[in-house]
Amino acid sequence: MNVLSRPAFLAGGLAALAAPALGADLTPVRVAGTPDADLVGTLWGIHSGIFQRAGLDVHVDRLNSGAAVSAGVIGGSIDIGKSSIFGLISAYIKGVPLVLEAVADVYDTKAPNTGFVVAKNSPITGPRDLAGKTIASPALGDLFSTVTGAWIDASGGSAKASNFVELPIPLALNAITAGRIDGAMMVDPYFQAAKDSGNCRVLGHPFDIIAKYFGVTYYFCGKSYAQANTDALARFRRCLAEASNYALAHQREMAPVIADYTKLDPAFITKLPIGIGIGMDPAPLQAVIDFAARIKSIPASFPASDIIDPAARQS
């Protein structure tokens, strides 16, 4: 997944935007996602006026789940959604006409923003010890529960012996501390909060069994919307790349912008690495698709290019 430098992007793409005057009519673009920091590229694009200068009136809605985001995109109340790649792959396999437009969040084993957390005094020492234990996940069969199960099996344990329950990630820390659950896979900012609490420890990083680097969440839209709005989407992707590059280079500056959207403490947000991705490299995406096929989450693998908007593909 290529990360363009700000100078390289400015030289290669921004000049092509042909931005209209600010007083000109703007094209509305409705974006939605869950309240996570991985939307920072879009948030900064709005805050800085990057989208507006490109003739786009981008508005972001906070929704409680990836399923709600997908339902909005399919129903037409949302133009561009941001959601987990596993859910998007599953929907695509079932015939939902969607296409990927850009990466939102990436997992990088060199600076993991996701991990499996247990209580500090828990007797659990490895994933195979999770047999018979209660494990929380935002939804049964989602990315976290699927990967956690595969991680347990790969360690010599049995995921079938574990008890998976549904629990939103923001509630998992208190549930672990109180002993209501034995562990959960968590993502920043809640992963960082668990580490800072002093009540938890990291058991491991289940995402490593997929790949050392891959996109976790993606921007997507309906295929019909992509076909009817090629120019607006091209401008959205280019503006998103510019805003994301700036965010990566000025992470502390993003804290109040992220805090306003997520409702988290800006001082806490400054501790978090920004794991946003830029562009649409099919290779890391292919690793996720192949993994899903390998664990029988989908019937068979397919070329990553099949689910990517042709206009968004990188060579």
Image (cartoon, rainbow, N blue to C red):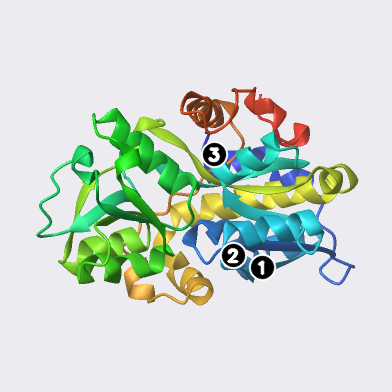
**Decide: marks 1, 3 in contact (CB < 8 A)?**
no
**Numbered badge on residue 177:** none
| For marks 3 and 2 on the same chain, the one whose residue lies earlier in the sequence | 3
* x and y, in percent, of residue 278 in the image: 56, 42
- Mark 1 vs mark 2, CA separation in Å: 8 Å
Structural distance between the alpha carbons of marks 3 and 2: 19 Å
Q: In this view, does 275 lie above or below 261?
A: above
Q: Kindly identify which numbered label has been placed on residue 4.
A: 3
Which residue matches tag 2? Answer: 43
* Residue 60 tag number: 1
Residue type marked 3: Leu
Q: Is residue 306 left or right of residue 64?
A: right
Q: Given contact means CB atoms under 8 Å apart, are the residues at marks 1 and 2 in contact? A: yes
Tag 1: residue type?
Val
Q: Residues within 10 Å of mark 3 (few under 14, many from 20)?
A: some
Relative side of 99 to 155, left or right: right
Quadrant (top left/top right/bottom left/bottom right) for the C terminus: top right
Q: Quadrant of residue 119?
A: bottom left
> Quick check: can you spot residue 94?
yes
Label 1 vs label 3, nearer the camera: 1
- The residue at the point 55 percent across, 26 percent down is 286
When asked about the image quadrant of residue 93, the answer is: top right
Label 2 Cα neighbours within 10 Å, binned few <14 / some 14-19 / many ≥20: many
**Which residue type carries mark 2?**
Leu
Residue at disc 1, secondary structure: strand
Mark closer to the observer (3, 2): 2
Q: At 37% across and 62% down in the image, what residue appears? A: 189
